[in-house]
Image (tube, helix red, strand yellow):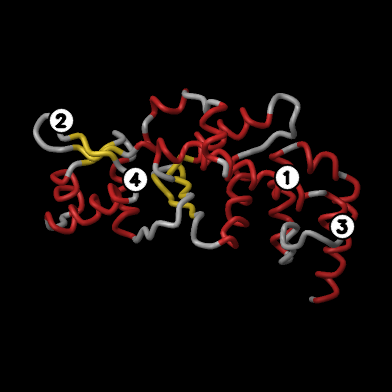
């Protein structure tokens, strides 16, 4: 078995050497290559040195991508409280990279974010519907918070009554979760809404997706 793995690894190295330009430039090809590596327990991103990094430059690629992700998250933090959809993050990163930069997929972003987790509990990935919310602040979010975020996904906001009805929770439990999101800046409270207050999640505002980060916002965000 070990001989077969060694042979497969050798073949994988030859494949990487032959197709390194394609792996660098084509996001879909890069995903397939990463999956091939995973089958034999090889992680091309695990080390900044060694064969994989030197051959493909993937270590530098994901390091640079991680820096760009941090810059976008910092620049938008005052709008969304540190939560951003994967789609919006992807859109903003592509804008920041410019037309002639290496193409980047959402899969690339997720891999880079997972590497950023070594910096501490500041970065996290929260499944919401068919996509993900990226958390870029060190707030403690448990399963209750995640479920409420998933509930708010369709409309961008949620109410205490909706939480009680959908999740069969007591009022106090719903309020505790919502108050925590308010305190962390991840939710905004609309007390003028008809019926009862609405807790809006800025990260889920579809209206914000088309807004660009201004140079002033970027400068203010980066220390």
Residue for badge 1: 30
Which residue is at 11% across, 29% downward?
194
Closer to the camera in the image, 160 or 6: 160
Q: Position of residue 203 (x, y in %)?
A: 39, 38
Q: Which mark is residue 161?
A: none
If you read the primary sequence from the N terminus, does the residue marked by circle 3 or circle 2 appear first?
Answer: 3
Numbered-mark total: 4
Q: Which mark is residue 185?
A: 4
The secondary element bearing badge 4 is classed as loop
Q: Position of residue 42 (x, y in %)?
A: 74, 64
If you read the primary sequence from the N terminus, does the residue marked by circle 3 or circle 1 appear first?
Answer: 3
Q: Distance between the residues labelled 3 and 4?
A: 47 Å
Q: Position of residue 5 (x, y in %)?
A: 81, 69
Residue for badge 3: 13
Q: Distance between the residues labelled 3 and 1?
A: 14 Å
Q: Distance between the residues labelled 4 and 2?
A: 19 Å
Decide: few, some or many residues near mark 3? Use Cα within 10 Å; few <14, some 14-19, many ≥20. Answer: some
Decide: few, some or many residues near mark 2? Use Cα within 10 Å; few <14, some 14-19, many ≥20. Answer: few
Q: Distance between the residues labelled 3 and 2?
A: 60 Å
The secondary element bearing badge 3 is classed as helix
Residue for badge 2: 193
The secondary element bearing badge 2 is classed as loop
If you read the primary sequence from the N terminus, does the residue marked by circle 2 or circle 1 appear first?
Answer: 1
Res 140 → quadrant: bottom left
Q: Position of residue 37 (x, y in %)?
A: 74, 58
Task: Indicate left or right for 14 with 183 as reference.
Answer: right
Give the label, 4 or 1, closer to the camera.
4
């Amino acid at each position: 078995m070990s001989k077969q793995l060694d042979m497969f690894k050798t073949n994988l190295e030859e494949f990487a050497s032959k197709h390194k330009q394609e792996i660098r430039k084509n996001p879909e090809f890069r995903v397939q290559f990463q999956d091939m590596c995973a089958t034999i327990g090889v992680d091309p991103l695990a080390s900044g040195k060694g064969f994989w990094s030197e051959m493909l430059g993937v270590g530098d690629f994901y390091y640079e991508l991680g820096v760009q992700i941090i810059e976008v998250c910092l620049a938008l933090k005052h709008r969304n409280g540190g939560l951003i959809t994967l789609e919006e993050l992807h859109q903003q990163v592509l804008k920041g990279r410019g037309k002639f930069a290496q193409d980047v997929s959402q899969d690339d972003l997720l891999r880079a974010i997972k590497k950023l987790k070594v910096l501490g509990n500041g970065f996290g990935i929260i499944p919401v519907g068919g996509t993900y919310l990226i958390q870029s602040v060190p707030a403690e979010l448990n399963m209750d918070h995640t479920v409420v975020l998933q509930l708010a996904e369709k409309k961008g906001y949620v109410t205490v009554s909706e939480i009680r009805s959908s999740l069969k929770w007591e009022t106090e439990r719903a309020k505790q979760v919502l108050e925590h999101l308010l305190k962390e800046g991840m939710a905004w409270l609309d007390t003028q809404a008809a019926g009862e207050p609405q807790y809006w999640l800025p990260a889920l505002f579809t209206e914000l997706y088309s807004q660009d980060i201004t140079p002033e916002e970027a400068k203010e965000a980066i220390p």
